[in-house]
Image: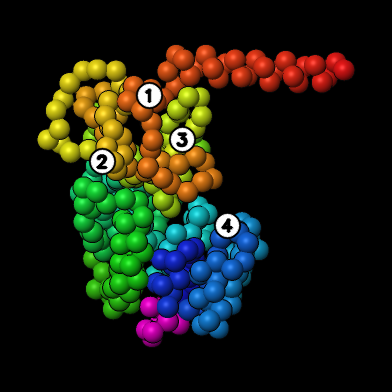
Amino acid sequence: MKILFFGDGAWAAESLRRIARRPWPVSAVIVRQRPSGDALERAAKELGLPVLQPGNVNSVEFLEIVRSFAPELNVSVSYDQIVRRDLLTVAPRGFVNFHAGKLPLYRGRNVINWALINGETEIGITGHYMDEGIDTGDIVLQRTLPIGWTDTYGDVLGRVVAAFPELVEDTLERIASGSAKARRQADLPGTYFGGRREGDEGLDWTDTSRNLHNKVRAITRPGPGARTVVGGEPVIVWRAFWDPSWPLYRATPGEIVGRRSDGAIVKTGDSTLWIQEVGAPGQAGALPNWPTGTRLGAGADNVRDLLARIRALEERLSSRRTS
């Protein structure tokens, strides 16, 4: 079973190494458009495989290159370009993709982050045939991995990366042997998640402690970190915790209501949150040292301060233009 391998990152690199030990020759490796030296590119070169980096994977020119390799199966592990019909149908055994989500739930992008934000207790990893939809093709093999209450994005990502090579190998084994019994996603209700963007990191202190606990751990390292504002300055909240047994009560959301040697307690919309590690953008994390009564978030005072700074900056720019 001749394979063309499309992918990116550590999970693709380790999956490629696993495939290379099996009797399924890989003709070439197709990598994302990015600077050279990616983990997958390094793995391909270690294995003596040619590396291709097309600007448009669906172009007529690249389709001809794919046809020249005569693949029986195309494989995608975290490849970023949307594959159109002509490329999907080149290989007689189809095009199989590996997705870090429990399809048909968690279609789309950044699904590890979204699973944590939603407080899931497990995450799925799925091998499925590709069709012209986004993560909608028939499922060949699916497994689940646990998510603990304090697991972070880095914890779950590491678990997924470690589990991917075996999922890839077992899925390809089923396809090669003809024992794959694909399950139609079209028969099941699903969900879709868009990619997270800059500006999505803000913490709303009127939200519940559960949601804030989940959001902080969902986008912490190696993600961008959750954001708040203190005295008009941005702050990253790297680590926080909530215990469901803590009391529920109404007070001012975003106010520091307690200090401890290992962090600060902030009031939320329904309970409190223990903030354990913070940092300014570009700096290492540290314990918060805010006194009780400090207000976090873009409250009225912070908004007035920011508006005053904007007006002062506009005046400086205007004076420079007229001088």
Which comes sooner in the sequence, label 1 or label 3? 3
- Residue 197 x/y as whole percent: 49, 39
- Give whichever of discs 1 and 2 has the lower sequence position: 2
Q: What amino acid is found at the position of numbered circle 2 in the picture? A: Phe
Name the residue at 41% across, 45% down: 286
Q: Which residue is drawn at 21% across and 52% down?
A: 148
Residue range corresponding to the magenta coloring: 18-25
Real-space CA distance between mark 4 and mark 3, rounded to the nearest whole angstrom: 42 Å
Kind of residue at badge 3? Val
Which one is nearer the viewer's eye here, 174 or 311?
Answer: 311
Secondary structure, magenta segment, majority class: loop
Q: Is mark 3 on a helix, strand or loop?
A: strand
Decide which of tag 1 and tag 4 comes sooner along the chain.
4
State left or right for residue 238 relative to residue 142: right
Q: Mark 2 — residue?
A: 241
Q: Mark 4 — residue?
A: 58
Which of the two labelled residues, at mark 4 and mark 3, occupies the earlier sequence position?
A: 4
Compare marks 3 and 2 and give the one earlier in the sequence.
3
Between marks 2 and 4 in the image, the one whose residue lies nearer the viewer: 2
Say what amino acid the circle numbered 1 marks.
Answer: Thr
- Where is residue 190? Give x, y as percent: 28, 43
User: What is the quadrant of the C terminus in the image?
Assistant: top right
Residue at the spot 43% in from the left edge and 52% down from the top edge? 222
Instruction: Report the Cα–Cα distance between label 1 and label 4.
Output: 54 Å
The label shown at residue 294 is: 1
Give the label, 1 or 3, closer to the camera. 1
Which quarter of the rendered picture does the N terminus lie within?
Answer: bottom left
Mark 2 to mark 4 CA distance (whole Å): 46 Å
Residue 7 at x, y percent in the picture:
48, 64
